[in-house]
Structures are given as C-alpha cells and as structure tokens.
Amino acid sequence: MTSRTLKIAVVSDLHVFNGSSEDSKSPSTIGTADAQDAPERHPLRGLAQIIERDKLSADLLICPGDLSDKADPAALIFAWRKLNELKEQLGAKYLLATAGNHDVDSRNQYDDHDPKGNLQSLDPMFPGVEEALCDRFWSRNFVIVEFDEVRVVLLNSSAFHGYGPDAKPEFRHGRISSKTLSALRMALAGGEKRINILVCHHHPITHNPVNEEDYSEMVGGDRLIDLLDSGEYGSWLMIHGHKHYPRLAYASGGASSPIIFSAGSLSAFLYQKIASRARNQFYILEIPIGDLDTLELDLAGTLTAWDWINMSGWQPAGAGSGLPHQVGFGWRESARTIATMIAKHLEDKTSVLTGEELLTAIPRLRYLRPEEIEAVVRRLGSSHGIIAQLKDGIICEVGRT
Ligand SMILES: [Fe+2]
C-alpha cells in the first residue's frame, strides 16, 4: 500500500475455454489455443501492455469466479496460471479468488464425482492463500485473509453445486447456508479492520438491469447483507461477478449498508441484451484509507474502468459501457444537501470554478457515483440557478453564468 491507499485490481468471469476464439461459437475472447502476440487481440496480452505502458499497479488482484467456461480442466489451469502472471505484472501481494458456477464440475463432465477436484488440484493452491487457509475455504465455504488494515472474506457461493439429489436446480443459483452464515458471524467477531471486503461469485440480491428471467442470486444473500449491515463488523465492500453486467450500488439497509460492486466480465461473450448496454471491462479500485477519517467517510474510493475493444485493445471505458472510466463511491448524501453546499461555496464567487477547484473546496465530491453527480447537477440548476458542466461523468465547470 502506498501512503495508505489500497489498490485492488478486479478481473471477473474470464470464461476461458479450451480451444480457439476464432471459432464462431466461442464463449470468450480467451481460448487456450489463441495466439498471444497481439495486445489489441488478446485481452491478457493487452492487460500486460497497459500495465507496463501506464505503470498500473495493485496491492490485491481479485477474481470473483468463472475463470473457466463449463469447468474445463485445461482452461482452468490456463486461466489460473495467467492470473498468477497478472498478479506479478501488477506487483500485487495477493491474488485472491473464489469459485464460480463455471469453475465447479457440477455436471460431472470431467471428473469422478468430484465437482471441486480440479480447483483443489491447481498450483499455486486455489483460492490463492496458504494451504491451511485454502483448506478452510473448502471446509467452511469461506476463509478470511487479513493484512495491515484490511480484511478480505472469500466466500464460496458455489459450495453446494454438484451434490445431492437436488444437484440440478442447485447449480442454477448461489447459496450461503444458515450454518455458513453462523460460522461467518462468529469468525467476524474476532476483530475489526478499517476496510472489509467480501468476495463472492453470485449476486447477493436480485440484480436485473436488462429485465431478464433470472433466479440465480445467492439463496441467503439477503441475510448475508443483514449481517454485514449490522455495524458490528465494520464497513463492507462486496465484490461479485456472475452477472457480466457492471454496477456499483449500495445495498438496502442502514446508512452503512455494504457497497456492492458487480464486476463486469473481463472476456466472456456478452449476449445481445447485455452487449447493447455494457462491455467487457477491467478495473482498478483505490481506497484512500489514510484520508477516510479526514473526509469523514466510512468506506469510500474511486474506480477506474477500461473497456475491451477487439482490434483496439483496452481503452478507457466510455459512455454506455456499464461503468464509465472514472467512478467514485462512498459519499452517501442527498443531492439537495450537496447542491446547497456547492451553492454556498459559490456565493461570493464571481467567476466560474473549474472541476479541480470545486474538488479542492469539497473533496468528498470525488466519492459520488455517476447517477448521484447527475442528480446534483440537476438540483444545482433547478434550485439554485447554477450551471454545472459534466465531462466523462465528472463536474468540469460550475458557475452562475
Ligand atoms: Fe460468468
């Protein structure tokens, strides 16, 4: 961590498959047989390029599952090796992952009635921690990793896939069982950290932005959110995959309900309904741990997103990509209050303020989500006669004329 800023790179839902993405029905732009010489054609080669070119780095690399497609063992080994290389490229201390429904051989296609056997055979050990902690992940369905001021829970929301007489319906959704919830509650009582992150594959509550039939959310997810929202175990950021549709939102509940980051897919083929509103994305989150108390914010940060554009490589995320290039999160205040704050600051100003000047005066503006910034801009106009110009989702100019 540099000057107490935690940087987290997120890659989710790679859906690597065993074959070539030249084939028309490939589930992903990453196949084990793909040439890796061109950064504008291979997403992982492309990441290596922008990491070197833009000097990107991270303390943590997080993968919320679906490394492989349909649990193909060769694809799983390939994806895990590539993620470990990415961790080195980013200079990250840990690669922390969890199992997606596509990583577990729930249909017994490849193994001898051992749905998690291929994950357990990976080298380095999955989900990226020392052996005793890996064993705990498999035996308890979660494991806690702690360092400095950070606590990360890796939750296996696919833990029951492939087992029992109800195996078929079970693999259609995630689950946290009552016993896992109880065990997690007891484990969290062991000590609080300033920053708490829970990584799982399935969405904990319904997340249906494109209005499709979807019942795959985590059974018990609402109770998991209640647990994290209780305030007894610190402030939480949840990072999940599975939906392939990026979103940053607050869970319902109290003022410190968890922040939920639904990571878009790094490389899975996006079906039409999603593809018209989102792209494959790569993320780096930054949490300014050292500044949070001064800012009077509980848990806040910024997120930078890149879009994958075949033949152009990774590009700063654009409008209509799911999440824009720069996003903030963590300042939960009404648009009315924030607009009044800005209006007061402008009271004795005769000239237009730049976005940077405004951020210097009110640094918490950096930690608003794009929807909230737009609401503030509307409120500035309707209640105060103030015009604010937006550029790339950020206020770049504000004034009364
Ligand atoms: Fe997926």
Image (tube, rainbow, N blue to C red):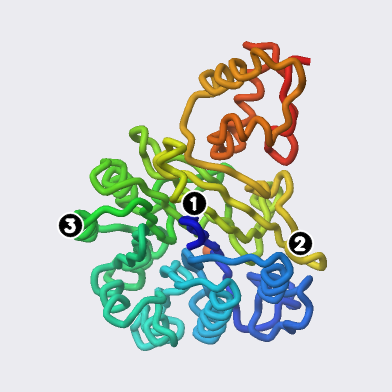
Q: Residue at x 82, y 68 (%)?
A: 311
CB atoms at circles 2 and 1 under 8 Å apart?
no
- Give the residue furthest to the right: 311
Q: Residue at x 55, y 78 (%)?
A: 88
Gap in Å between the C-alphas at discs 2 and 3?
Answer: 45 Å
Q: Position of residue 346 (x, y in %)?
A: 65, 18
Local secondary structure at mark 1: strand
Q: Amino acid at mark 2?
A: Ile
Indicate left or right for 294 with 91 as reference. Answer: left
Where residue 375 sits in the image (x, y, percent)?
61, 25
Res. 269 image quadrant: bottom right
Q: Earlier in the sequence, mark 2 or mark 3?
A: 3
Q: At 54% from the left edge and 23% from the top edge, which residue is drawn?
A: 338
What residue is shown with label 2?
309
10 Å crowding of disc 3: few (<14), some (14-19), many (20+): few
Residue type marked 3: Met
Specify the amino acid type for callout 1. Answer: Ile
- Secondary structure beneath dot 3 equals helix
The label on residue 287 is 1
